[in-house]
């Protein structure tokens, strides 16, 4: 078994005195999609944010590519090859699509920026059609595509996606999930995905972790989790 690309070992995180993560251990291997599922407030977003160094973990260790990244700044962690697409698609509304994408490459400029842009336009043809449109005037789905595209401009080894389907129409959700799958299948991207839409997320991912109250209570192959009685009752809402 190879070493995981990302390893969280017994990580604790706090917001002030509130403990949000309690001894979280998660492995993500290169080339896989791993999903975190859990109810509101379970700690999914905090797990992604802690990986990025904000908040900094109070206990435990986080390894990326074999390097201990515990305590490093968010900038440094991004520079090592972790790109974070936060919940709520924080794009620059006043900048055009092209300028938003170019901003994504500022921290780690690509050797071939034009090629990178073409790859992103290939992945999201809608963005190619709207290069000169301001980000703030895009639809929700287009903004999500832009947010993911911008993260990819930094040529990361690991993509952290927080609720990419949030608030989008089912047909757009399908497109976004298909793109996530293509990123893994065609670009060998490694993805840690947080989703409320547990059924679809488990269908597209390789493995999953279930979080309750800041702790991992269950983990396994996504197919096993889809069939797990506890998961079905709590998170799959009667879906089959
Ligand atoms: P959701 O699906 O609702 O986004 P989540 O699983 O992503 O939930 P987190 O956002 O990680 O959960 O929250 C975990 C816990 O940390 C919750 O109890 C939440 O209230 C708390 N929390 C999150 N952000 C902050 C903050 N900035 N300050 C204080 N407490 C916070």
Image (spheres, rainbow, N blue to C red):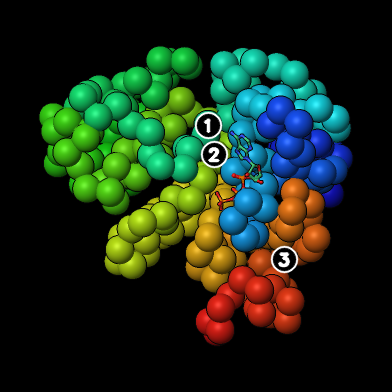
Mark positioned earlier in the residue sequence (3 or 1): 1
* Left or right of 66 on screen, residue 142: left
Is residue 240 visible in this depiction of the protein? yes
Q: Name the residue tied to disc 3.
A: 221
Query: Residue at horizontal 20%, vertical 42%?
Result: 138
* Left or right of 182 on screen, residue 4: right
Looking at the rendered structure, the secondary structure element under dot 3 is strand
Residue 200 in the image, given as x and y percentages of width and height: 50, 68
Query: Residue at horizontal 58%, vertical 26%?
Result: 81
How many marks the image carries: the answer is 3
Is residue 4 visible in this depiction of the protein? no
> Quick check: 121 above or below 37?
above
Are discs 1 and 2 less than 8 Å apart at CB? yes
Residue 83: numbered disc: 1
Image quadrant assignment for residue 79: top right
Residue 111: numbered disc: none
Residue 65 in the image, given as x and y percentages of width and height: 72, 30
Q: Name the residue tied to disc 2.
A: 159
- Marks 3 and 1 sit apart, C-alpha to C-alpha, by 24 Å
């Amino acid at each position: 078994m190879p070493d995981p690309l990302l390893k969280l070992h017994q990580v604790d995180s706090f917001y002030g005195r509130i403990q949000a993560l309690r001894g979280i251990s998660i492995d993500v291997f290169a080339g896989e999609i791993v999903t975190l599922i859990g109810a509101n407030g379970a700690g999914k977003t905090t797990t992604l944010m802690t990986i990025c160094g904000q908040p900094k973990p109070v206990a435990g260790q986080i390894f990326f590519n074999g390097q201990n990244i515990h305590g490093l700044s968010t900038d440094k962690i991004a520079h090592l090859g972790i790109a974070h697409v936060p919940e709520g698609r924080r794009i620059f509304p006043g900048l055009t699509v092209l300028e938003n994408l170019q901003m994504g490459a500022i921290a780690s400029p690509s050797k071939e920026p034009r090629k990178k842009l073409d790859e992103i336009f290939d992945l999201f043809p809608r963005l190619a059609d709207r290069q000169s449109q301001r980000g703030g005037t895009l639809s929700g789905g287009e903004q999500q595509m832009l947010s993911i595209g911008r993260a990819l401009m930094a040529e990361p080894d690991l993509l952290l996606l927080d609720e990419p389907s949030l608030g989008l129409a089912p047909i757009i959700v399908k497109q976004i999930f298909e793109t996530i799958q293509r990123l893994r299948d065609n670009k060998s991207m490694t993805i840690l995905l947080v989703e409320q839409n547990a059924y679809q997320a488990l269908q597209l991912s390789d493995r999953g972790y279930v979080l309750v109250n800041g702790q991992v209570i269950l983990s396994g192959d996504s197919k096993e989790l889809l069939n797990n009685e506890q998961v079905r009752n709590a998170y799959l809402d009667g879906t089959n």
